[in-house]
Image: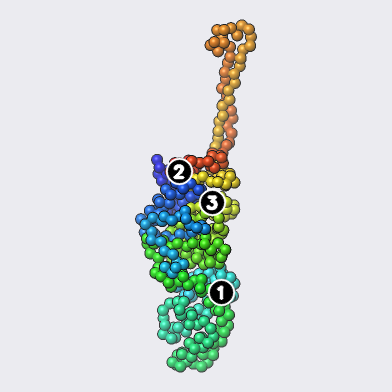
Amino acid sequence: MNYLQYINSVYRPVQNDISTRYLISGIDFRVRQVLGQYIMNSLYDAGKILFILDNTQSGSDFTNFGRFHVLNPLNGDVDLCNDLFEVTSLREISRLRSLLAELGFEGTKAMKVVNYLSFVRETERRLGNNGPLCMETLEEYSGTALVKWKLCQLEESGGLSRENYEYLLTRYAEVSSAAADFEMFLVMLAPFVGGGSQPHPGTAVHLAIGEFGSDRAMQEVMCRLMLAFTKKQPSACSVLIVDDGKCDRECIVEVLKNLPTATDVHMFTTDAFSLGDRDLSVLMRTFPVRIYSRHDSMDSCSRIEACCGQIDVVRRSYTTTVDKRIRASTAFDMLFGTNRTEAETCNVPVREARYRKETINSLCSGTAIIDCGGTQVLFQF
């Protein structure tokens, strides 16, 4: 029986249409290679759009993504959210507000940005432009002088009265400060919005959040845009999280909390047990199949030992009674051992760790513990 047969025999998902989610923790290269190849092939054959959430500093350990065509959104290769600036529904407004919150816009200021976008959208509609808002359109409203020029165009064409001109200009003045601050952040959104084509099955979008370890806002922007895309078509998307344990992982935990249930997600990390108890519990709830290979940290090995639980161990004790009497110590008795009596005793069962931390710290190459369905088994990959 191989590892897939074992997992299928002990794990029964609540919904049959939900794929198995894998958490692979440890530094064993062989285990990561075998499971990585299987996951990549499965996702590609299922026609998934793959998002690679790369939280490593270099990414050198994760360069083989199978048959997927990898795109880099930082180069403008892919458009993650072409309708980001549309605010015609509560769902779209909520999506934009959550993104603005990560950029430091508090509630009232975020709503001023929403009103600013609504103002631009309505002005463009009056000018005959019914297409979605884009970066180029917003640049035409960057400043009071340009806004006045747009409104003058409407007034001259008869689409706006003088009273409405003054009214709209006053409304713009109320949100102009928030609009100016928003325009400062557009450079961060530019690579992801309105650039290349939309992701399609067989493509992988590489989000290198580990490269922006000192820029939390940029990490949040990338994660929020990925979540916004996956929520539109959750069953068509999949997420692969790659982590080397050297960067802050708060963004990863937030993604796992907000990811749609129908979206496949898998995680490769060198040490999942270096997380705090609360964040680790999120991982345990998200991934029903957990695979632990060799770990360097003895603290992490101790936590894995606790996760694997204990078993009853029955130990036997042996005693030997020697007859010291002279008549029992003849040469014949000593030759055949008839001057002694041996006894075997079964002691009371004691609870011991199923896999000791020393064992986990010294697992052989290609060997890992599969934690699935309430059981833990050691497998050779």
| Front residue of this view, candidates 372 and 151 | 151
Tell me the residue that label 1 is attached to: 110
Tell me the residue that label 3 is attached to: 272
- In the rendered view, tell whether residue 173 sits above or below residue 314: below
In space, the residues marked 2 and 3 are separated at their CA atoms by 19 Å
Q: Looking at the image, which residue is at 63% across and 7% down?
A: 326
In space, the residues marked 1 and 3 are separated at their CA atoms by 35 Å
Residue 366, label in figure: 2
- The answer to whether residue 9 of the structure is visible from this angle is no
- Residue 25 appears at what percent x and percent y? 50, 49
- Residue 206 appears at what percent x and percent y? 45, 62
- Residue 229 appears at what percent x and percent y? 45, 66
Tell me the element at label 1: helix
* Callout 2 touching callout 3 (CB < 8 Å): no
CA neighbours of label 3 inside 10 A, class few (<14), some (14 to 19), many (20+) = many
* Callout 2 touching callout 1 (CB < 8 Å): no
Residue type of the residue flagged with mark 2: Gly
Residue type of the residue flagged with mark 3: Ala
Mark 1 and mark 3 lie on one chain; the one further toward the N terminus is 1
Tell me the element at label 2: loop
CA neighbours of label 2 inside 10 A, class few (<14), some (14 to 19), many (20+) = some
- In the rendered view, tell whether residue 159 sits above or below residue 327: below
